[in-house]
Image (cartoon, rainbow, N blue to C red):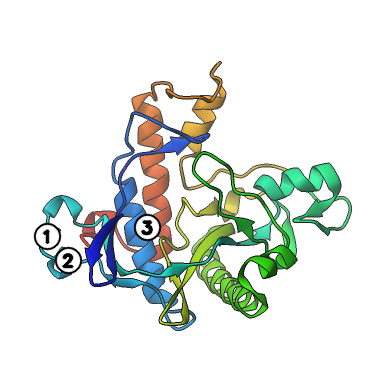
Amino acid sequence: MYDAGDGNLLIVATDRLSAFDVVMDEPVPNKGRVLTAISAFWFDHLRDIAANHLISTDIADFPEGAKDSELAGRSMYVRRAEMLPIECIVRGYITGSAWKEYKRSGTMHGVELPEGMLESQQLPEPVFTPSTKAADGLHDENISYERAVELVGADLAAQARDLSLALYTAGAEWASARGIIIADTKFELGLIDGELVVADEMLTPDSSRFWPADQWVPGTTPPSFDKQPVRDFLETLDWDKTPPGPTIPDQVIADTVARYTEGYERITGKSLTDWSG
């Protein structure tokens, strides 16, 4: 992320990949392009629901010094926002940290859920489940809505909740028609000139869980259109999940590239090879 002057930023998405909070040495080719391209798609597709920080993804519009062909397709020229100190998470299915909490206490973010739910089961309706934004080296902490109110105020918390739910619902409906379940997602929201907007990335495979609908079976963990092949490989190793990361085989990288690319192309209906920003 670079200061582009005039209250703007340049965000460059690289092909670096982290797993279990460790950055791997091997890049995932085109990962940065996928994250940028799919964010740009959603920013445009959902602009009637929420404003966003994007100015342009075309390097011709970038400030002098940033008109570099190596940045094409993986960079966004954006307005700087005053970011909320919470992660705006929406869950449509119970999985991840929410499933772990449910197994432990029968709750999700402190709210009691029905007994007998299965992993990956669809929730009765999407739920806004915020978390803190942890300092470097720490993990985000799931918090209650009441705690979010304490952090940002009642009015802003309600706006963030309602906007996040509306964005998730519209995005999930679009994806569902294309054979993808968006199980959950994280929005980064901030204020620009007093208006709440979406910033950073939006409904990407890195900020969301994308599942192939035809492979979703409650009680199991469905495959996802992201770095799951890398995580699966690492789980087979005797590795303590501290740096440095193990060497990732070429086939695992290739499988991961394929996951990211398929997710983008199914969501947008476009070929990644045609994306240039």
Q: Gap between marks 2 and 3, in whole Å? A: 26 Å
Q: Residues within 10 Å of mark 1 (few under 14, many from 20)?
A: some
The residue at 53%/25% (across/down) is 241
Counting from the top left corner in percent of width and height, residue 25 is at: 34, 28
Counting from the top left corner in percent of width and height, residue 124 is at: 76, 66
1 and 2 marks in contact (CB < 8 Å): yes
Residue at label 3?
A: 265
Q: Which amino acid, mark 2?
A: Phe
Mark number, residue 67? 1
Is 4 situated left or right of 226 in this image? left
Q: Which amino acid, mark 3?
A: Glu
Sequence-wise first label, 2 or 3: 2
Counting from the top left corner in percent of width and height, residue 81 is at: 40, 70
- The quadrant of the rendering that contains the N terminus is bottom left
The residue at 33%/30% (across/down) is 26
Mark 1 vs mark 3, foreground winner is 1
Is 225 situated left or right of 76 in this image? right
The residue at 56%/15% (across/down) is 238
Q: Is residue 24 above or below residue 83?
A: above
Secondary element under disc 3, as helix, strand or loop, is: helix
Residue at label 2?
A: 62
Mark 2 vs mark 3, foreground winner is 2
